[in-house]
Image (cartoon, grey):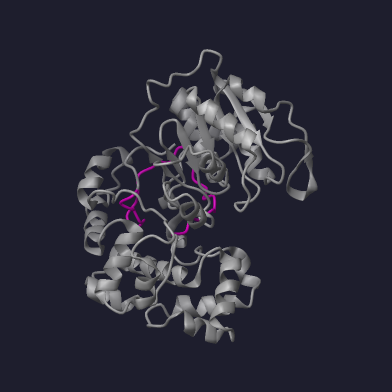
Amino acid sequence: MSQDSAAVPDPARKLAARRRREIVAVLLFSGGPIFESSIPLSVFGIDRQDAGVPRYRLLVCAGEDAPLRTTGGLELSAPYGLEAIARAGTVVVPAWRSITQAPPPAALDALRRAHEEGARIVGLCTGAFVLAAAGLLDGRPATTHWMYAPTLAKRYPSVHVDPRELFVDDGDVLTSAGTAAGIDLCLHIVRTDHGADAANALARRLVVPPRRTAADLGHQRYLDRSLPEEIGADPLAEVVAWALEHLHEQFDVETLAARAYMSRRTFDRRFRSLTGSAPLQWLITQRVLQAQRLLETSDYSVDEVAGRCGFRSPVALRGHFRRQLGASPAAYRAAYRARRPQNGAPDGALRTERSERAALGAGGDRFAAVAGHGHGAAAALATAEGGDHAPQADAYAARLPEAPVGRGAGRPVLPSQRERPVG
Protein backbone atom coordinates (compact mmCIF):
# COMPACT_ATOMS: atom_id res chain seq x y z
CA MET A 1 0.00 0.00 0.00
CA SER A 2 1.10 3.54 -0.49
CA GLN A 3 2.10 6.06 2.07
CA ASP A 4 0.27 9.29 1.37
CA SER A 5 2.03 11.69 3.66
CA ALA A 6 0.17 14.56 5.22
CA ALA A 7 3.10 16.70 4.18
CA VAL A 8 2.61 19.21 1.40
CA PRO A 9 5.17 21.21 -0.53
CA ASP A 10 6.58 24.17 1.38
CA PRO A 11 4.35 27.12 0.43
CA ALA A 12 7.44 29.33 0.49
CA ARG A 13 8.81 27.33 -2.46
CA LYS A 14 6.22 28.02 -5.10
CA LEU A 15 6.71 26.77 -8.63
CA ALA A 16 9.05 29.07 -10.51
CA ALA A 17 7.39 31.19 -13.20
CA ARG A 18 9.26 29.48 -16.05
CA ARG A 19 8.15 26.02 -14.94
CA ARG A 20 4.83 24.50 -15.95
CA ARG A 21 2.97 21.93 -13.88
CA GLU A 22 1.83 20.01 -16.97
CA ILE A 23 5.42 19.57 -18.22
CA VAL A 24 7.03 16.30 -17.07
CA ALA A 25 10.77 15.78 -17.53
CA VAL A 26 12.04 12.19 -17.47
CA LEU A 27 15.73 11.88 -16.69
CA LEU A 28 17.43 8.91 -18.36
CA PHE A 29 20.89 7.48 -17.74
CA SER A 30 22.99 4.94 -19.58
CA GLY A 31 22.65 1.42 -18.22
CA GLY A 32 19.12 1.94 -16.88
CA PRO A 33 16.60 -0.91 -17.30
CA ILE A 34 14.28 -0.24 -20.21
CA PHE A 35 11.05 -1.36 -18.49
CA GLU A 36 11.31 1.13 -15.62
CA SER A 37 12.44 3.83 -18.04
CA SER A 38 9.43 3.27 -20.27
CA ILE A 39 6.82 3.61 -17.49
CA PRO A 40 6.74 7.43 -17.23
CA LEU A 41 7.12 7.69 -21.01
CA SER A 42 3.97 5.60 -21.49
CA VAL A 43 1.99 7.36 -18.77
CA PHE A 44 2.91 10.98 -19.50
CA GLY A 45 4.07 10.88 -23.12
CA ILE A 46 1.02 9.63 -25.03
CA ASP A 47 -1.98 11.79 -25.88
CA ARG A 48 -5.04 9.94 -24.53
CA GLN A 49 -7.43 12.86 -24.34
CA ASP A 50 -9.95 10.86 -26.35
CA ALA A 51 -10.18 8.49 -23.37
CA GLY A 52 -10.63 11.27 -20.84
CA VAL A 53 -6.99 11.48 -19.76
CA PRO A 54 -5.62 15.03 -19.51
CA ARG A 55 -2.52 15.60 -21.57
CA TYR A 56 0.96 16.13 -20.16
CA ARG A 57 3.90 17.46 -22.12
CA LEU A 58 6.83 15.08 -21.93
CA LEU A 59 10.49 16.08 -22.07
CA VAL A 60 12.87 13.10 -22.24
CA CYS A 61 16.22 14.34 -20.96
CA ALA A 62 19.66 12.72 -21.03
CA GLY A 63 21.24 12.78 -17.60
CA GLU A 64 24.71 12.32 -19.09
CA ASP A 65 26.49 12.29 -22.42
CA ALA A 66 25.14 10.03 -25.17
CA PRO A 67 24.87 7.32 -26.20
CA LEU A 68 22.56 5.96 -23.52
CA ARG A 69 22.73 2.18 -23.57
CA THR A 70 19.96 0.21 -21.91
CA THR A 71 18.69 -3.35 -21.50
CA GLY A 72 19.77 -5.70 -24.27
CA GLY A 73 22.38 -3.31 -25.60
CA LEU A 74 19.85 -0.89 -27.08
CA GLU A 75 21.02 2.67 -27.59
CA LEU A 76 18.73 5.60 -26.82
CA SER A 77 19.01 9.16 -28.03
CA ALA A 78 17.18 11.59 -25.75
CA PRO A 79 15.88 14.72 -27.53
CA TYR A 80 16.75 17.00 -24.58
CA GLY A 81 19.56 17.54 -22.14
CA LEU A 82 19.64 18.67 -18.53
CA GLU A 83 18.81 22.24 -19.50
CA ALA A 84 15.24 21.21 -20.39
CA ILE A 85 14.53 20.28 -16.77
CA ALA A 86 14.33 24.01 -16.05
CA ARG A 87 10.85 24.04 -17.68
CA ALA A 88 9.38 21.04 -15.85
CA GLY A 89 6.99 21.10 -12.92
CA THR A 90 7.54 17.36 -12.41
CA VAL A 91 10.88 15.58 -12.79
CA VAL A 92 10.97 11.77 -12.88
CA VAL A 93 14.06 9.61 -12.39
CA PRO A 94 12.79 6.16 -13.45
CA ALA A 95 15.93 4.18 -12.58
CA TRP A 96 19.64 4.29 -11.86
CA ARG A 97 22.08 1.85 -13.39
CA SER A 98 23.96 0.75 -10.27
CA ILE A 99 23.43 1.28 -6.58
CA THR A 100 27.22 1.21 -6.13
CA GLN A 101 27.90 4.15 -8.46
CA ALA A 102 27.49 7.84 -7.79
CA PRO A 103 25.17 9.71 -10.18
CA PRO A 104 26.66 12.49 -12.35
CA PRO A 105 27.09 15.74 -10.38
CA ALA A 106 25.47 17.81 -13.13
CA ALA A 107 22.29 15.74 -12.92
CA LEU A 108 22.21 16.05 -9.14
CA ASP A 109 22.59 19.82 -9.41
CA ALA A 110 19.71 19.96 -11.88
CA LEU A 111 17.47 17.98 -9.51
CA ARG A 112 18.33 20.18 -6.54
CA ARG A 113 17.64 23.31 -8.54
CA ALA A 114 14.32 21.95 -9.78
CA HIS A 115 13.27 21.09 -6.22
CA GLU A 116 14.30 24.49 -4.92
CA GLU A 117 12.14 26.07 -7.61
CA GLY A 118 9.07 24.12 -6.54
CA ALA A 119 9.12 21.18 -8.95
CA ARG A 120 7.79 17.80 -7.85
CA ILE A 121 10.61 15.22 -7.86
CA VAL A 122 9.84 11.53 -8.43
CA GLY A 123 12.13 8.51 -8.09
CA LEU A 124 10.93 5.15 -9.40
CA CYS A 125 12.60 1.96 -8.14
CA THR A 126 16.39 2.57 -7.98
CA GLY A 127 15.81 6.17 -9.02
CA ALA A 128 15.46 6.76 -5.28
CA PHE A 129 19.25 6.42 -5.04
CA VAL A 130 19.64 9.44 -7.33
CA LEU A 131 17.24 11.48 -5.20
CA ALA A 132 19.08 10.42 -2.06
CA ALA A 133 22.44 11.33 -3.57
CA ALA A 134 21.02 14.78 -4.32
CA GLY A 135 20.02 15.14 -0.66
CA LEU A 136 16.32 15.34 -1.52
CA LEU A 137 15.35 12.42 0.73
CA ASP A 138 17.10 13.61 3.89
CA GLY A 139 14.71 13.36 6.83
CA ARG A 140 11.93 12.01 4.61
CA PRO A 141 10.11 8.68 4.26
CA ALA A 142 10.97 6.83 1.05
CA THR A 143 10.92 3.42 -0.56
CA THR A 144 12.73 1.55 -3.32
CA HIS A 145 13.05 -1.99 -4.63
CA TRP A 146 12.91 -4.36 -1.65
CA MET A 147 16.25 -5.91 -2.58
CA TYR A 148 18.05 -2.57 -2.44
CA ALA A 149 16.24 -1.03 0.54
CA PRO A 150 18.92 -2.11 3.07
CA THR A 151 21.64 -0.48 0.96
CA LEU A 152 19.66 2.74 0.63
CA ALA A 153 19.05 2.83 4.38
CA LYS A 154 22.66 2.12 5.28
CA ARG A 155 24.20 4.52 2.77
CA TYR A 156 21.78 7.34 3.59
CA PRO A 157 20.91 6.92 7.28
CA SER A 158 18.88 10.15 7.39
CA VAL A 159 16.36 8.64 4.93
CA HIS A 160 13.45 6.77 6.54
CA VAL A 161 13.33 3.74 4.24
CA ASP A 162 10.15 1.68 4.21
CA PRO A 163 10.51 -1.30 1.85
CA ARG A 164 6.92 -2.47 2.48
CA GLU A 165 5.29 0.36 0.59
CA LEU A 166 4.41 0.35 -3.11
CA PHE A 167 5.09 4.06 -3.13
CA VAL A 168 5.56 6.95 -0.74
CA ASP A 169 4.11 10.40 -1.41
CA ASP A 170 5.84 12.98 0.78
CA GLY A 171 4.33 16.00 -0.92
CA ASP A 172 6.95 17.36 -3.30
CA VAL A 173 9.16 14.25 -3.29
CA LEU A 174 7.77 10.83 -4.20
CA THR A 175 9.37 7.38 -4.49
CA SER A 176 8.17 3.94 -5.57
CA ALA A 177 9.18 0.35 -4.98
CA GLY A 178 10.48 -1.97 -7.68
CA THR A 179 9.43 -2.21 -11.31
CA ALA A 180 5.62 -2.37 -11.55
CA ALA A 181 5.16 -0.17 -8.49
CA GLY A 182 6.30 2.66 -10.74
CA ILE A 183 2.99 2.31 -12.55
CA ASP A 184 1.15 2.65 -9.24
CA LEU A 185 2.99 5.86 -8.44
CA CYS A 186 2.46 7.37 -11.89
CA LEU A 187 -1.27 6.62 -11.66
CA HIS A 188 -1.26 8.24 -8.23
CA ILE A 189 0.30 11.38 -9.72
CA VAL A 190 -2.40 11.53 -12.39
CA ARG A 191 -5.04 11.03 -9.71
CA THR A 192 -3.52 13.81 -7.60
CA ASP A 193 -3.38 16.21 -10.56
CA HIS A 194 -6.67 15.42 -12.29
CA GLY A 195 -8.82 13.25 -10.05
CA ALA A 196 -9.94 9.62 -9.85
CA ASP A 197 -11.84 9.59 -13.16
CA ALA A 198 -8.76 10.54 -15.13
CA ALA A 199 -6.57 8.01 -13.31
CA ASN A 200 -9.15 5.26 -13.76
CA ALA A 201 -9.48 6.04 -17.46
CA LEU A 202 -5.71 5.82 -17.85
CA ALA A 203 -5.61 2.54 -15.92
CA ARG A 204 -8.20 1.08 -18.29
CA ARG A 205 -6.10 2.10 -21.28
CA LEU A 206 -3.00 0.55 -19.71
CA VAL A 207 -5.01 -2.54 -18.64
CA VAL A 208 -3.80 -2.33 -15.05
CA PRO A 209 -5.66 -2.01 -11.74
CA PRO A 210 -6.33 1.65 -10.93
CA ARG A 211 -5.48 1.14 -7.28
CA ARG A 212 -3.24 -1.51 -5.85
CA THR A 213 -2.20 -2.03 -2.23
CA ALA A 214 0.71 -3.80 -0.60
CA ALA A 215 -1.89 -6.09 0.97
CA ASP A 216 -2.87 -7.24 -2.53
CA LEU A 217 0.53 -8.92 -2.78
CA GLY A 218 -0.44 -11.34 -0.05
CA HIS A 219 1.84 -13.35 2.23
CA GLN A 220 4.52 -13.73 -0.45
CA ARG A 221 6.17 -10.72 1.18
CA TYR A 222 7.31 -12.65 4.21
CA LEU A 223 9.93 -15.32 3.69
CA ASP A 224 9.90 -16.47 0.09
CA ARG A 225 10.68 -13.03 -1.38
CA SER A 226 13.33 -11.98 1.13
CA LEU A 227 16.29 -12.81 -1.12
CA PRO A 228 17.12 -12.12 -4.76
CA GLU A 229 15.62 -14.69 -7.10
CA GLU A 230 19.07 -15.40 -8.54
CA ILE A 231 20.06 -17.21 -5.36
CA GLY A 232 18.18 -20.28 -6.58
CA ALA A 233 21.08 -21.12 -8.90
CA ASP A 234 23.76 -20.63 -6.26
CA PRO A 235 25.16 -23.38 -3.98
CA LEU A 236 24.20 -21.24 -0.98
CA ALA A 237 20.53 -21.69 -1.86
CA GLU A 238 20.37 -25.00 0.01
CA VAL A 239 21.80 -23.42 3.14
CA VAL A 240 19.35 -20.51 2.92
CA ALA A 241 16.43 -22.90 2.45
CA TRP A 242 17.55 -24.89 5.50
CA ALA A 243 17.78 -21.72 7.57
CA LEU A 244 14.25 -20.65 6.64
CA GLU A 245 12.87 -24.09 7.49
CA HIS A 246 14.60 -24.15 10.89
CA LEU A 247 14.03 -20.62 12.16
CA HIS A 248 12.38 -22.14 15.24
CA GLU A 249 15.75 -23.58 16.23
CA GLN A 250 18.59 -21.67 17.84
CA PHE A 251 21.55 -21.55 15.46
CA ASP A 252 24.02 -18.89 14.38
CA VAL A 253 25.94 -17.92 11.27
CA GLU A 254 28.76 -20.29 12.20
CA THR A 255 26.23 -23.11 11.80
CA LEU A 256 25.28 -21.87 8.33
CA ALA A 257 28.92 -21.52 7.30
CA ALA A 258 29.60 -25.08 8.42
CA ARG A 259 26.65 -26.37 6.40
CA ALA A 260 28.08 -24.58 3.37
CA TYR A 261 31.52 -26.11 4.04
CA MET A 262 33.06 -22.64 4.21
CA SER A 263 34.98 -20.63 6.73
CA ARG A 264 33.00 -17.90 8.45
CA ARG A 265 34.89 -15.19 6.55
CA THR A 266 34.34 -16.82 3.17
CA PHE A 267 30.69 -17.48 3.93
CA ASP A 268 30.12 -13.85 4.97
CA ARG A 269 31.77 -12.58 1.80
CA ARG A 270 29.85 -14.93 -0.51
CA PHE A 271 26.53 -14.28 1.20
CA ARG A 272 26.98 -10.51 1.08
CA SER A 273 28.02 -10.51 -2.58
CA LEU A 274 24.96 -12.59 -3.46
CA THR A 275 22.32 -10.82 -1.38
CA GLY A 276 23.73 -7.40 -0.51
CA SER A 277 23.24 -8.22 3.16
CA ALA A 278 25.44 -9.68 5.87
CA PRO A 279 24.25 -13.17 6.88
CA LEU A 280 23.90 -12.13 10.53
CA GLN A 281 21.68 -9.20 9.58
CA TRP A 282 19.62 -11.33 7.20
CA LEU A 283 19.04 -13.98 9.86
CA ILE A 284 17.72 -11.46 12.38
CA THR A 285 15.30 -10.09 9.81
CA GLN A 286 13.98 -13.57 9.01
CA ARG A 287 13.33 -14.22 12.69
CA VAL A 288 11.62 -10.85 13.11
CA LEU A 289 9.46 -11.46 10.02
CA GLN A 290 8.48 -14.87 11.34
CA ALA A 291 7.60 -13.30 14.69
CA GLN A 292 5.55 -10.66 12.91
CA ARG A 293 3.60 -13.33 11.08
CA LEU A 294 2.91 -15.28 14.28
CA LEU A 295 1.79 -12.13 16.09
CA GLU A 296 -0.69 -11.46 13.29
CA THR A 297 -2.00 -15.01 12.81
CA SER A 298 -1.74 -16.77 16.18
CA ASP A 299 -2.55 -16.34 19.86
CA TYR A 300 0.89 -17.36 21.10
CA SER A 301 2.25 -15.20 23.88
CA VAL A 302 5.25 -13.02 23.13
CA ASP A 303 7.45 -15.45 25.06
CA GLU A 304 6.14 -18.35 22.96
CA VAL A 305 6.65 -16.39 19.75
CA ALA A 306 10.25 -15.73 20.73
CA GLY A 307 10.87 -19.44 21.23
CA ARG A 308 9.18 -20.39 17.96
CA CYS A 309 11.33 -17.92 16.04
CA GLY A 310 14.68 -19.04 17.41
CA PHE A 311 15.36 -16.08 19.67
CA ARG A 312 17.35 -16.94 22.77
CA SER A 313 14.99 -14.93 24.97
CA PRO A 314 11.88 -12.72 24.77
CA VAL A 315 14.18 -9.79 25.54
CA ALA A 316 16.13 -10.46 22.34
CA LEU A 317 12.89 -10.61 20.34
CA ARG A 318 11.61 -7.35 21.80
CA GLY A 319 14.86 -5.51 21.10
CA HIS A 320 15.20 -6.63 17.49
CA PHE A 321 11.48 -6.28 16.80
CA ARG A 322 11.37 -2.71 18.06
CA ARG A 323 14.49 -1.71 16.15
CA GLN A 324 13.18 -3.11 12.87
CA LEU A 325 9.47 -2.35 13.12
CA GLY A 326 9.35 0.61 15.48
CA ALA A 327 7.07 -0.98 18.08
CA SER A 328 7.13 -3.70 20.71
CA PRO A 329 5.64 -7.09 19.74
CA ALA A 330 2.68 -6.55 22.06
CA ALA A 331 1.97 -3.07 20.70
CA TYR A 332 2.29 -4.31 17.14
CA ARG A 333 -0.22 -7.11 17.73
CA ALA A 334 -2.66 -4.77 19.47
CA ALA A 335 -2.46 -2.20 16.68
CA TYR A 336 -2.79 -4.85 13.99
CA ARG A 337 -5.88 -6.40 15.53
CA ALA A 338 -7.48 -3.04 16.31
CA ARG A 339 -7.10 -1.97 12.71
CA ARG A 340 -8.43 -5.08 10.98
CA PRO A 341 -11.48 -3.89 9.01
CA GLN A 342 -14.89 -5.04 10.11
CA ASN A 343 -17.21 -6.41 7.42
CA GLY A 344 -14.93 -5.29 4.62
CA ALA A 345 -14.97 -1.62 5.55
CA PRO A 346 -13.27 0.51 2.86
CA ASP A 347 -9.97 2.24 3.38
CA GLY A 348 -11.64 5.59 3.90
CA ALA A 349 -13.29 4.32 7.06
CA LEU A 350 -10.01 3.34 8.70
CA ARG A 351 -7.97 5.31 11.19
CA THR A 352 -5.90 8.34 10.40
CA GLU A 353 -2.16 8.64 10.68
CA ARG A 354 -2.54 10.30 14.06
CA SER A 355 -4.41 7.25 15.34
CA GLU A 356 -1.60 5.04 14.12
CA ARG A 357 0.95 7.05 16.03
CA ALA A 358 -1.14 6.81 19.17
CA ALA A 359 -1.39 3.02 18.79
CA LEU A 360 2.26 2.42 18.04
CA GLY A 361 3.97 5.26 19.85
CA ALA A 362 6.19 7.97 18.43
CA GLY A 363 8.10 6.80 15.39
CA GLY A 364 6.08 3.60 15.06
CA ASP A 365 4.40 4.51 11.80
CA ARG A 366 7.42 3.78 9.65
CA PHE A 367 9.00 0.37 9.29
CA ALA A 368 12.51 1.67 8.63
CA ALA A 369 14.90 -0.82 7.09
CA VAL A 370 18.04 0.59 8.65
CA ALA A 371 21.06 -1.68 8.44
CA GLY A 372 23.63 -1.20 11.15
CA HIS A 373 21.38 0.75 13.54
CA GLY A 374 20.37 -0.30 17.02
CA HIS A 375 22.84 -1.29 19.71
CA GLY A 376 25.62 -2.36 17.37
CA ALA A 377 27.20 -5.59 16.27
CA ALA A 378 28.15 -6.71 19.74
CA ALA A 379 24.55 -6.91 20.87
CA ALA A 380 23.57 -8.65 17.65
CA LEU A 381 26.35 -11.20 17.97
CA ALA A 382 25.35 -11.88 21.54
CA THR A 383 22.00 -13.18 20.39
CA ALA A 384 23.25 -14.53 17.05
CA GLU A 385 20.36 -13.51 14.89
CA GLY A 386 20.59 -11.04 11.97
CA GLY A 387 18.75 -8.93 9.35
CA ASP A 388 18.47 -5.57 7.70
CA HIS A 389 15.40 -5.34 5.57
CA ALA A 390 11.84 -6.39 5.04
CA PRO A 391 11.03 -7.67 1.56
CA GLN A 392 8.89 -5.98 -1.02
CA ALA A 393 7.26 -8.25 -3.56
CA ASP A 394 7.36 -7.21 -7.18
CA ALA A 395 4.52 -9.25 -8.69
CA TYR A 396 1.83 -7.14 -10.32
CA ALA A 397 -1.33 -8.78 -9.02
CA ALA A 398 -4.23 -8.29 -11.41
CA ARG A 399 -7.54 -6.95 -10.15
CA LEU A 400 -10.70 -5.85 -11.89
CA PRO A 401 -10.52 -2.09 -12.47
CA GLU A 402 -13.80 -1.41 -10.73
CA ALA A 403 -13.15 -3.65 -7.72
CA PRO A 404 -13.34 -1.96 -4.29
CA VAL A 405 -10.11 -1.30 -2.49
CA GLY A 406 -11.28 -2.46 0.94
CA ARG A 407 -8.97 -4.81 2.79
CA GLY A 408 -10.59 -8.19 3.15
CA ALA A 409 -10.28 -10.47 6.13
CA GLY A 410 -7.15 -12.52 6.21
CA ARG A 411 -4.91 -10.00 4.47
CA PRO A 412 -2.09 -8.53 6.54
CA VAL A 413 -2.77 -4.87 7.29
CA LEU A 414 0.41 -3.35 8.63
CA PRO A 415 0.42 -0.53 11.16
CA SER A 416 2.88 1.38 8.96
CA GLN A 417 0.39 1.76 6.17
CA ARG A 418 -1.25 5.12 5.70
CA GLU A 419 -4.99 5.26 5.94
CA ARG A 420 -5.78 7.02 2.71
CA PRO A 421 -6.99 5.70 -0.62
CA VAL A 422 -4.15 4.28 -2.65
CA GLY A 423 -3.12 5.96 -5.88
Q: Quadrant of residue 2?
A: top left
Res 186 visible: no
Q: Seen in the image, is 238 located left or right of residue 222?
A: right
Q: Position of residue 194 (x, y in %)?
A: 47, 23
Q: Residue at x 64, y 74 (%)?
A: 234
Residue found at x 33% / y 76%: 311
- Left or right of 202? Residue 42 is right
Residue 351 percent across, percent down from the top left:
25, 42
Q: Is residue 136 magenta?
A: no
Which of the 4 image quadrants contains residue 92?
A: top right
Q: Is residue 3 visible?
A: yes
Q: Which residues are magenta?
A: 390-416
- In the displayed orientation, state which residue is furthest to the top: 17
Q: Nearer the viewer, residue 217 or 139?
A: 139
Q: Looking at the picture, does residue 289 appear above or below residue 112? A: below
Screen quadrant of the C terminus: top left
Q: Residue 54: give x, y in percent of width and height.
A: 55, 21
Q: Position of residue 282 (x, y in %)?
A: 46, 68
Above or below for 337 versus 61: below
Residue at point 59% right, 64% down?
A: 229
The residue lying at 38 percent from left, 83 percent from top is: 249
Q: Is residue 402 found inside the magenta-colored segment of the image?
A: yes
> How many marks on residues?
0
Q: Main secondary structure of the magenta part?
A: loop
Is residue 31 left or right of 363 when viewed as pictured? right
**Residue 389 versus residue 39: which sits nearer the camera?**
389
Q: Nearer the viewer, residue 175 or 400?
A: 175
